[in-house]
Amino acid sequence: MSENNCGKSTKCVHTGTFQDCITKGANTPVYTSTSNGFNCESGNLYYPRYLNMPNHKAVADKICALEEGGEEAIIVSSGMAAISSAMLALLKTGDHVLFSEDLYGGTDYFLKEELEKFGIDYTLASAENLEEFESKIKDNTKFIYFETPSNPLLKIIDIEEIVSIAKKYDIITIIDNTFACPINQNPLKFGVDIVVHSASKYLNGHSDLICGAIITSEKLMKRIRPYVINTGGTLNAQDLYLLERSMKTLNLRMQKHNENAQKLAEYLEKHPLVKKVYYPGLKSHAGHSIAKTQMSGFGGVLSVETTLNKEKTREFISNLKLFQEAGSLAGVESLISLPCETSHAKMSFETRCGLGITDSLMRISAGIEDIEDLIADIKQAFEKI
Ligand SMILES: Cc1ncc(COP(=O)(O)O)c(C=O)c1O
């Protein structure tokens, strides 16, 4: 039976996992050697930075199988390494990039800080208004880069529409699929060319690793792989092993994240102190109908705007007992943060507020705890205000 035809839980557990012929153990052994013999048969020199060690292959094969439509995957040392490598491998001085304006703050900071000094031009525009977005394409535009659902407002972009615009101009598309993760959304199936992930989030899911992934076609990987090898953003064997271990439960975890976030969103939407809940699983969400066509689950992150000012919002957060205030997201534990102080702290006040990321917007990452306990925690934190 080919694993390619299996369901996602089976792929999470089995695909890529490498059986050592001495022990026939259930887990991939950790290959720590950085000095390895030259393999005369394959002509390979095994070296971790060359992305060719067994622990790298185990995880890359697993992610590639889950990101349906992917031909090759590589694992790198962070989500930002995946994002910057995928971009810079394809760009040269004089090129232009079109970005959706709803991006993770680190990506926004990267393009504003790093692209200009290489003479690379870019435009940020709303991809919710597709006609306007298309009008920003220039003769030298090399790719469109977007994120859906976006961090932190969970905006939904129509993937098929973006792909059809890009194809008209023969432009590559890159998507950050971190928030959905391959369990809930497979953009390559809709014609996207390159998927990047912060694997530090759901793919790992235990708030203890920094890593990233790039999944694409064999043809595009021929351009990206040498860039990653040359710039050296490799991930070490122990972390690769931990990522592989975490990914065995990815589908299970994701079902609970999806379920808990949906229930939290529905509870919060009815709360008298809540003005707006941003979650694509809610009928009230502007992108709900598009999300239903391209996602099989709506993810574990939601954002909330209450009637409280920033001071009272802080008080609410400090009243929480189960939700921990922390940057980052997608761990098994429920987390809460103010994006203005964490993921989007480097964005200017005007840009941030223009996008809807106010000083009191709270981003919640629903963990996998019992939903009754999470709701009770939020209820008591509001009651104390
Ligand atoms: C959507 C998204 N993409 C990319 C990143 C960057 O990932 P990393 O911190 O692993 O570099 C993050 C980090 O929060 C993120 O939320």
Image (cartoon, grey):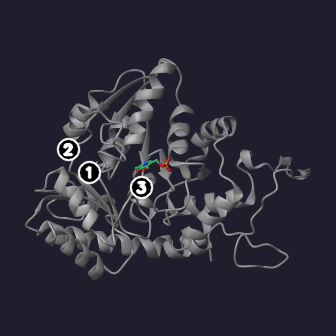
Residue 118 in the figure: left or right of residue 267 = right
Q: Nearer the viewer, mark 1 or mark 3?
A: 3
Mark 1: which amino acid?
Answer: Leu
**Crowding at mark 1 (Cα within 10 Å: few <14, some 14-19, many 20+):** many
Mark with earlier residue (2, 3): 3
Give the distance between the C-alpha atoms of the residues marked 1 and 3, in whole angstroms.
Answer: 15 Å
Q: Report which quarter residue 277 is drawn in.
A: bottom left
Residue occupying image coordinates x 34% and y 41% = 345
**Crowding at mark 2 (Cα within 10 Å: few <14, some 14-19, many 20+):** some
Whether label 3 lies within 8 Å of ligand 1 gets the answer: yes
Name the element at disc 1.
loop
Q: How many numbered badges does the structure rendering display?
A: 3
* CB-based contact (under 8 Å), mark 2 and mark 3: no
- The residue singled out by tag 3 in the image is 328
Q: Report which quarter residue 308 is drawn in.
A: bottom left
* CB-based contact (under 8 Å), mark 2 and mark 1: yes
Name the element at disc 3.
loop
Q: Quadrant of the C terminus?
A: bottom left
- Taking depth in this image into account, of 342 and 28 the one nearest to the observer is 342
- The residue singled out by tag 1 in the image is 153
Q: Report which quarter residue 180 is drawn in.
A: bottom left
The dot on residue 356 is 2
- Taking depth in this image into account, of 174 and 202 the one nearest to the observer is 202
Mark with earlier residue (1, 3): 1
- Taking depth in this image into account, of 363 and 123 the one nearest to the observer is 363
Mark with earlier residue (2, 1): 1
Residue occupying image coordinates x 66% and y 64% = 241
Q: Nearer the viewer, mark 2 or mark 3?
A: 3
